[in-house]
Image (cartoon, rainbow, N blue to C red):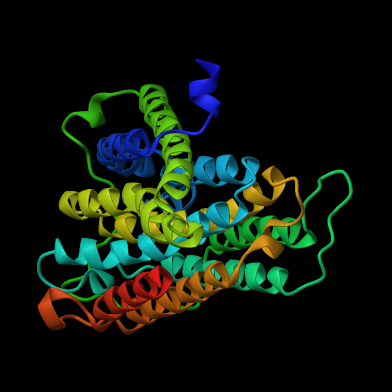
């Protein structure tokens, strides 16, 4: 039994587990969207802040486990590409959710200062990761991680505190007839349940996502070993997509529920925490610094995630009402950028 859990998995088994874990992730993500929307109202945090922190953490748990398991198994490029590949795929989730939003573009309806600020936070985190890759290869005593890992955690914590503690922002989104305000509303079923029970179910579903993340990471190792595909491509195209499934599904489900601010917050908040996956991977990788183990494919993928995030921020600021194929300019660009990135990584 222990050999089955820790040993190398056959290619056929790896593919089957990969697909099953992905399906479980989808089911859990749909449930998380309903629970997250209700808890956002109960806690008083609002969809943007709750979605970016708690909801983002729950949907990122699978990616955290994938990165940690791959790094501990001495597959640093797989671990790194999963983290940043998940960010790229999750950013694409905004375009997917936009296609399910009727009327104006999702970025127009979900105008929110916290969402814009979390996008800025994500750009800073990705920039720090790139700086670490080109910095001297040193580690912090006792912790065994690169100094940039400590800086990234502090940067994230400080950013969240600033976003949460700004009671009178000097920038506000102009309210239009198509803007969907973040106002509390009662769920006909969940609204009758106690807050403690809601948190308990939220935690239980999140744990299922963790188990799915472990299974995907182990299956990805079997895919790399059995198929001969490059680790960077498997991490970005396969692990990254499964890593992004919770955000994609929850964003679409949130849009269908009318929680458009939560849909954007789940993506951007999850992306910020996926950037911190690199810190988890650096701690789990004992052969040196995960940042310096990143190959050109991984650095290219990080740059692509940066560009995609800047495009998304542009869409949130411009707030285009309508565009091609029910998508704004940013949705079209996100699809083009992600497709080009995956194609280039395949060769």
Where 247 falls versus 317 (above or below)?
Answer: above
Q: Nearer the viewer, residue 131 or 32?
A: 131
In the displayed orientation, state which residue is furthest to the right: 141
Find residue 246 and report its horizontal and vertical position in percent. 34, 46
Q: Nearer the viewer, residue 171 or 308?
A: 308
Find residue 196 and report its horizontal and vertical position in percent. 41, 23
User: In this image, 87 relative to 30: left or right?
Assistant: right
Q: Residue at x 46, y 71 (%)?
A: 305
Where 253 falls versus 324 (above or below)?
Answer: above
Q: Residue at x 53, y 67 (%)?
A: 122
Rendered image quadrant of residue 234: bottom left
Q: Residue at x 21, y 48 (%)?
A: 253
Where 223 falls versus 157 (above or below)?
Answer: above
Q: Residue at x 64, y 41 (%)?
A: 72
User: In this image, 255 relative to 112: left or right?
Assistant: left
> Can residue 317 be seen by looking at this rendering?
yes
Find residue 16 and report its horizontal and vertical position in percent. 29, 35
Find residue 323 and report its horizontal and vertical position in percent. 16, 83
User: In this image, 4 relative to 131: left or right?
Assistant: left
In the displayed orientation, state which residue is furthest to the top: 1
């Amino acid at each position: 039994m222990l050999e089955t859990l820790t040993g190398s998995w056959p290619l056929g088994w790896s593919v089957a587990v990969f697909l099953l874990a992905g399906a479980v992730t989808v089911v859990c993500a749909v449930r998380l969207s309903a629970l997250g929307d209700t808890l956002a109202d109960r806690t008083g945090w609002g969809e943007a802040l709750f979605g970016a922190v708690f909801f983002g953490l729950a949907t990122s748990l699978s990616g955290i486990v994938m990165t940690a398991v791959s790094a501990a198994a001495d597959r640093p490029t797989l671990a790194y590409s999963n983290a940043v590949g998940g960010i790229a795929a999750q950013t694409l989730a905004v375009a997917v959710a936009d296609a399910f939003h009727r009327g104006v573009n999702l970025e127009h309806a979900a105008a929110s200062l916290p969402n814009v600020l979390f996008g800025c936070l994500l750009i800073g985190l990705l920039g720090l990761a790139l700086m670490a890759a080109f910095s001297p290869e040193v580690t912090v005593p006792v912790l065994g991680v690169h100094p940039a890992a400590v800086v990234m955690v502090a940067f994230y914590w400080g950013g969240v505190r600033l976003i949460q503690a700004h009671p009178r922002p000097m920038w506000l989104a102009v309210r239009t007839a198509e803007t969907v305000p973040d106002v509390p509303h009662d769920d006909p079923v969940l609204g009758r349940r106690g807050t403690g029970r809601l948190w308990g179910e939220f935690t239980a579903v999140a744990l299922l996502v963790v188990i799915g993340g472990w299974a995907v990471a182990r299956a990805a190792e079997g895919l790399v070993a059995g198929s001969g595909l490059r680790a960077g491509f498997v991490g970005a195209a396969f692990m990254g997509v499964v890593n992004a499934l919770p955000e994609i599904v929850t964003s679409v489900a949130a849009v269908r529920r009318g929680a458009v601010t939560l849909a954007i917050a789940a993506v951007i908040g999850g992306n910020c925490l996926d950037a911190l996956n690199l810190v988890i991977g650096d701690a789990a990788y004992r052969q040196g610094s995960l940042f310096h183990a990143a190959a050109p494919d991984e650095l290219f993928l990080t740059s692509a995630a940066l560009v995609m995030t800047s495009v998304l921020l542009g869409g949130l600021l411009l707030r285009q009402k309508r565009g091609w194929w029910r998508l704004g300019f940013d949705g079209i660009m996100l699809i083009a950028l992600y497709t080009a990135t995956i194609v280039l990584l395949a060769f």
